[in-house]
Image: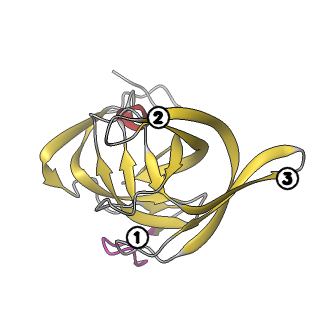
Amino acid sequence: MSTDNHGRAVAPIVIGWRERIALPDLGIVLQAKIDTGARTSALHATRIRRFEKDGRAWVRFHIPHSSGVAATDCEAPLVDQRAVKNTSGLPQQRLVIETGLVLGHRRWPIEITLANRSAMAMPIILGRTAIRRRRILVDAGKSFLAGPPLVAGILFAQKGTRE
């Protein structure tokens, strides 16, 4: 069984195939599709531009308005550029960032590729590497089991508004 930072056992949580999540480092709360068949996570982004900041590679990108998400511009350190198979199974070069993920009351860092997901129903897909080793079980027949994301003491309602 996994343990927390204090050595206590952590019980697994059950989540649905759709969950409300937060990416607080990017300042966004959105609905995610949980896809254990996908290895990599992908966030819908446009106007993706590399730049340098403090001698490090960074990326600036735009999150368009969709699925209850207000349009916003984001910046994050660039972690890598990788060939990732898209939904058609074809390799595609994508930029990779690392950011914090909040699912229910849990938070951990994940890597996300930036991709054009405009043809997809949800702006983000969480692949299995994002939830691996986190004591998470996915109930493919249910949605929104984790509850709204808790970010720094702020509880976000299912529609993304603060409570």
In what element is the residue under mark 1?
loop
Query: Looking at the image, can residue 109 be seen?
Result: no
Residue found 48% across the figure and 49% down from its top: 101
Secondary element under disc 2, as helix, strand or loop, is strand
Q: Residue sitting at 58 percent across and 48 percent down?
A: 99
Q: Identify the mark nearer the N-term, 2 or 1.
A: 2
Total numbered circles: 3
Quadrant for residue 109, please give it.
top right
Q: Nearer the viewer, residue 27 or 119?
A: 119
Q: Which residue is mark 2?
A: 84
Q: CA distance from mark 3 to mark 1?
A: 32 Å
* Colouring: secondary structure
Specify the segment rendered in magenta. Answer: 155-162
Quadrant where the C terminus is found in the figure: bottom left
Instruction: Please say whether residue 97 is visible from this viewpoint.
Output: yes
Give how far across and how far down residue 80 sits, in percent.
Answer: 65, 35
What secondary structure is found at the residue carrying circle 3?
Answer: strand
Q: Mark 2 or mark 3, which is nearer the start of the sequence?
A: 3
Question: Pointer 1: what residue?
Answer: 156
Percent x, y for residue 95?
60, 44
Q: Per the image, is 14 magenta?
A: no
User: Residue flagged by tag 2: what amino acid is it?
Assistant: Val
Q: Residue 140 in the image: state x and y as whole percent.
A: 14, 44
Tell me whether circle 3 and circle 1 mark residues in contact (CB < 8 Å): no
Q: Which residue is tagged 3?
A: 53
Three-letter code for the amino acid on which mark 1 is drawn? Phe
Q: Give amino acid for label 3.
A: Lys
Q: Position of residue 110 (x, y in %)?
A: 52, 40
